[in-house]
Amino acid sequence: MKPNSVEYVNYGSITVMSNHHLKEFAWGLANSKYHFLWVVRPDVVMGESAILPVEFMEEIKDRGFITSWCP
């Protein structure tokens, strides 16, 4: 990855997944150690709200930004 660059992650508007898969992806992203912008729609998890673990948020606090929408 080039210096001063950021990974952009967005599943689009029609993708849905299980809560387990969301958490697996989240930890993969955290373990990459990259700076990132991740768009996580509230309805990306089938049948429930997308909620990421507090431990994940603590791990990425200095290098990750998560939002629910991006143009």
Image (cartoon, grey):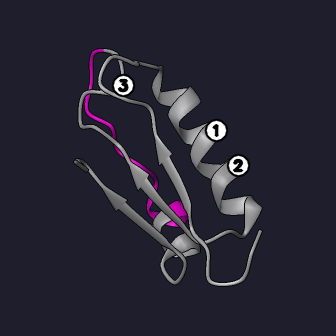
Task: Indicate left or right for 63 with 2 as reference.
Answer: left
Q: Secondary structure at mark 1?
A: helix
Q: Secondary structure at mark 2?
A: helix
* Residue occupying the point 27% across, 15% down: 47
> Is disc 3 in contact with disc 2, using a CB cutoff of under 8 Å?
no
Question: Looking at this view, is 2 or 45 the one in front?
Answer: 2
Q: Amino acid at mark 2?
A: Gly
Label 3 neighbour load within 10 Å: few <14, some 14-19, many 20+? some
Q: Secondary structure at mark 3?
A: loop
Q: Is residue 40 above or below residue 7?
A: above
Q: Is residue 61 above or below residue 20?
A: below
Q: Position of residue 37 (x, y in %)?
A: 45, 61
Quickly name the residue at label 3.
Answer: 45
Distance of label 1 from label 3 (alpha carbons): 13 Å
> Is disc 1 in contact with disc 3, using a CB cutoff of under 8 Å?
no
Q: Amino acid at mark 3?
A: Val
Label 1 neighbour load within 10 Å: few <14, some 14-19, many 20+? few
Task: Indicate left or right for 8 with 32 as reference.
Answer: left
Look at the image and give the residue range highlighted in magenta.
47-56
Which label belongs to residue 28? Answer: 2
Image quarter in which the N terminus is found: bottom right
Indicate yes or no whether the magenta region holds residue 48.
Answer: yes
Quickly name the residue at label 1.
Answer: 24
Label 2 neighbour load within 10 Å: few <14, some 14-19, many 20+? few
Q: Position of residue 17 (x, y in %)?
A: 46, 20
- Quadrant of res 33: bottom right
Question: Looking at this view, is 5 or 35 the one in front?
Answer: 5
The numbered mark, 3 or 2, whose residue comes first in the sequence reads 2
